Image (cartoon, coloured by chain):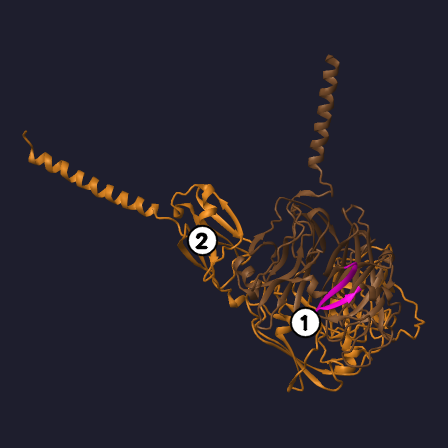
Chain colours: A brown, B orange
Amino acid sequence: MKKLYYFAAACAAFVLLVAANRSTSHPYGLKTGTADVKSISAIAFGPDGILFLGDSRSAAVFAIDTKDKTMVEKAAAVEIKNIDQKIAAALGTEVKNIRIQDIAVNPISKKIYCAVQSSDGTPVLLKLEGDKIQAVSFKDIEFSTISIANVPGEDVKDRGGRPLRDQSISDLNYSDGSVLLSGLSNQEFGSTFRKIAFPFSDKQEQSSLEIFHAAHGKYETNSPIRTFTTAELNGKKYLVASYTCTPLVLFPLDELKAGKHVKGRTVAEFGAGNSPIDMVTLKKDGNSYLFMANSNRPVMRINYKNIETYEGALTEPIKESYSTAGVNFVTLPTVNVLQMDKLDDTQVLVLQRRANGDLDLWTARGDRWI
Amino acid sequence: MLTNPVNNKKIRRPVVWCLVFSFLLISCSDIKKDPLPVSIQWQNNRAVSMTIPRELLQGVAKDSVEQLLHIQLENTNTPVLGEYIITDEAVVFRPLVAFTRGLNYEVWFSGKLLNKVVIPSGSTHDAPKIVAVYPTSDTVPLNLLKIYIVFSKPMQEGQSLNNITVIKNQRDTVPSVFLDLELWNNERTIHTLWLDPGRIKRDLQPNKTMGAPLQQGESYQVIIKQDWRDVEGVSLASEYQRDFVVGLRDSLSPDAESWTIHTPKAGGHERLKIDLHESLDYVLLKNTVRVVDKTGKVINGVIETAAEETILYFTPSGEWSPGDYTLEIESRLEDLAGNNLNRLFDKDLTRQSKKATKEIYKRSFRVQ
């Protein structure tokens, strides 16, 4: 009998030990500490309330655990008028001294996270709850980070004294266990694209490629990616990217491998004199729709079915000024949208510069947009 | 009771002095008890925190301070976000973003205005300056791709397109010359401006509708407004102006084989001089060229450019040892039109280039 007690006690101790170990190691390998974030160019949510921050200045990506995991199925519509003034006041400064870099909605809690850069270079991460603005601290948090300073596959030794390249992150997304990010250089015209496995590993399994497309006939446009998303088309995963002068280009995700140059297929031209800003995908009645905000054109709606059935690639130059070609799209009566993200399955969060100059955050109903 | 008037007098004087002394002592201690004023702490010219002595907070318990105290920008009703560090002597408030120069802040406690704090504007004698604008040549190619502006201090981002104007023939402002793509080096001291590549590349739609951003034979003036501020909020010391003339289209890749290498003598710090025979990209010259010895070891040194970026100087940190060296040039080095060692920026994809491309181009030289 005594032996049985000893055995039970040993079992209990073992269980406790395992439980204790579990509580100290984070499932995604995050460690507790202070994240030395120097700038925030783009943010995107990953799994389980993990927020990815693209830090151009440190040439790094941070993964931080927001611990914001209480499930909310349907988000309450958000409307914050003059959000720039409210954020500036909360930061004790004027509107001209802040820039809203990116907005992301936590897909679990439906809370809004907002990356702001102050004119003195201080990066700020804010959480919006109703009209309450809260700071998200980088101190004593669970986080991990990965450097994107080096050319993938090339370590410091290989670089042989050459300085690290400065680069700027133009967009960042999470898809199927990987952080995808597009970067711009301040020295060469063009973009790099990286696929970084998450949890981040010491091995830094990164992929990088330069992207070419020949949308304009015989002349190459080695243009930088401004915004992108991922989508499944005809059962295959694609990177859906848009560039300055607004071509929409598809790249098979499985072809994006380290050092490989992939030539994209241009499926639409949405008009010159314009830059794409942001993309979201909404579903209705089994159909998926891509919404794209633009610098000099209204928000566009593209039915993914039309992209799936468009088998060609645009290779002829556009002849008529500012005209469009390729996959059909619909323009919505919504202009000057600076940021968008999905608030939930039926609503889109929109940051819009109104005709009177106000900057408002509001919620668009998906059923009205589709 | 009998009293001695003499003794009385003797006692009275010290008592009076004692009273006077005590009064002074009390007065002094009263001065000491005057609470210290609210103060601002500075770090690298930024107002990073505010210290509020606890005495001003009427003996409120530590754990209640945060509920009752807040700092706000004048004429707003929003508490500034930040961290409160509470000690026995003072409350230190560290705002999320440093207090802005030239703005007034209010300290509110328990619904009452406790203090007003003015953050002085930045000193103008230390104003940022424009050190250089590259390319430095007076004549640029028709298909000029980028301009670098070098500042003496880290600058604020997002102000570029509002503060730069290009004027043609001293008359017309040229619209949409630059791409809406603001890029900086990490230190925020070098700003890269791209001339709209869509307008540079022949046959592209923006090129056809709006034409090339610059026209051959015309003169232009780049004006950079004084309003552009550095990260401390101080405006440029003065407005900047640069004149240039537009020459021929550059449709040739730089050719490292044609460069003339003037070799230095062994045993000294003499500069290695390379004549590039054309103006090349300033920032890329500094980042893509290096000297290695015959064992492949990189020679430490400084790269400088001269004569409108047609000359590159390499000054070694140590003395030149006699022997063979290699000048390594990364293929991404570009001329002013974005043509790099491997390809033209405005490349005709239908014509296959027969030129073999490589990552690193090499030129050998001997030091003796």
Nearer the observer, A345 or B206: A345
Q: Main secondary structure of the magenta part?
A: strand
Residue under label 2, please give it: B39
Q: Amino acid at mark 2?
A: Ser
Quarter occupied by residue B142? bottom right
> Mark number for residue A105?
none
Nearer the observer, B245 or A222: A222
Residue B171 seen anywhere in this rendered image of the structure: yes
Residue under label 1, please give it: A333
Judged from the image, the secondary structure of the residue bearing numbered disc 2 is strand
Q: Callout 2: few (<14), some (14-19), or many (20+) C-alpha neighbours within 10 Å?
A: few
Give residue A110's position: percent from left, percent from top.
65, 52
- Of the two numbered discs 1 and 2 in the rendering, the one whose residue sits closer to the viewer: 1
A309 lies above or below B94: below
Residues at marks 1 and 2, CA–CA distance in whole angstroms: 52 Å
Magenta-drawn segment: A285-303
Instruction: Say if labels 1 and 2 share a chain.
Output: no
Identified at 76% across, 63% down, the residue is A290
Residue B143 seen anywhere in this rendered image of the structure: no
